[in-house]
Amino acid sequence: MTRFCLSAHLPHRKFLFSTAITSAFMILTGCQTVTHTNNLNASSLNSSQSAVVANTAPVPSALSTQSKLTPAVQTVIGDYATDSYDKRQQGYDWVGVMVRPFGEAEIDIKVRARGDIKNPSCSYEGKATLMGQDLAHGVIFQTVANNSVTFLQFKDGKLTIDSQDKTALNYFCSGGDTLAGDYQKLASQLVLS
């Protein structure tokens, strides 16, 4: 009798266990969309399994609206540039970083440099994940650039880009320049020309 009861509930436990594992994996990896490959429907399940399927909330879209962003992401969105950006009319070279939201706790990063007078000295595109936030350090994001862990620190209107391998960020620039350094937040959008 015990074997019969155990085997009768085993498919239900497998379903709940696989659902829990899948949900945990999606949360840890940042996956926000799911395509089911099995053909489960309420008519093929018993009543308790149907209740679990019927009460499952839809997974939010990966492209969240501004209101769903974490406060940390909302704080850092904007354009940043090196100090020489203010002197671009006099021909100074500059590097700019455009930060846009990508999900609730991630950002999209685009680095561009002056390209109107000469070839741009730096270029990079990537995503970074929120690592943490506190008063002492500001908001910290992390990414991997040129096989090196790279940190983006946002504090007091300033973005600081740094890497564990100091030369790894030279790869994205020419003429001995690097992505590592300080960038000031701009009051308006970056002008690329």
Image: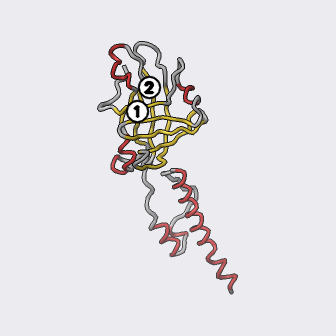
Q: Residue at x 58, y 28 (%)?
A: 167
Q: Is residue 153 left or right of residue 189?
A: right
Query: Toward the viewer: 103 or 45?
Result: 103
Query: Toward the viewer: 13 or 106?
Result: 106
Residue 5 found in image quarter: bottom right
Q: Is residue 18 left or right of residue 108?
A: right
The location of residue 35, given as percent across then percent down, is 53, 53
Amino acid type assigned to the residue bearing label 1 in the image: Met
Q: Quadrant of the N terminus?
A: bottom right
The location of residue 123, given as percent across then percent down, is 49, 26
Q: Residue at x 46, y 44 (%)?
A: 140
Q: Name the residue tied to disc 1.
A: 98
Query: Toward the viewer: 61 or 173?
Result: 173
Q: Earlier in the sequence, mark 2 or mark 1?
A: 1
The location of residue 160, given as percent across then percent down, is 45, 35
Relative to 27, residue 53 above or below = below
Q: Secondary structure at mark 2?
A: strand
* Mark pair 2, 1: CA separation: 8 Å
Relative to 3, residue 88 above or below = above
Amino acid type assigned to the residue bearing label 2 in the image: Arg
Do the residues under discs 2 and 1 have CB atoms within 8 angstroms? yes
Q: Is residue 57 left or right of residue 13?
A: left
Q: Name the residue tied to disc 2.
A: 112
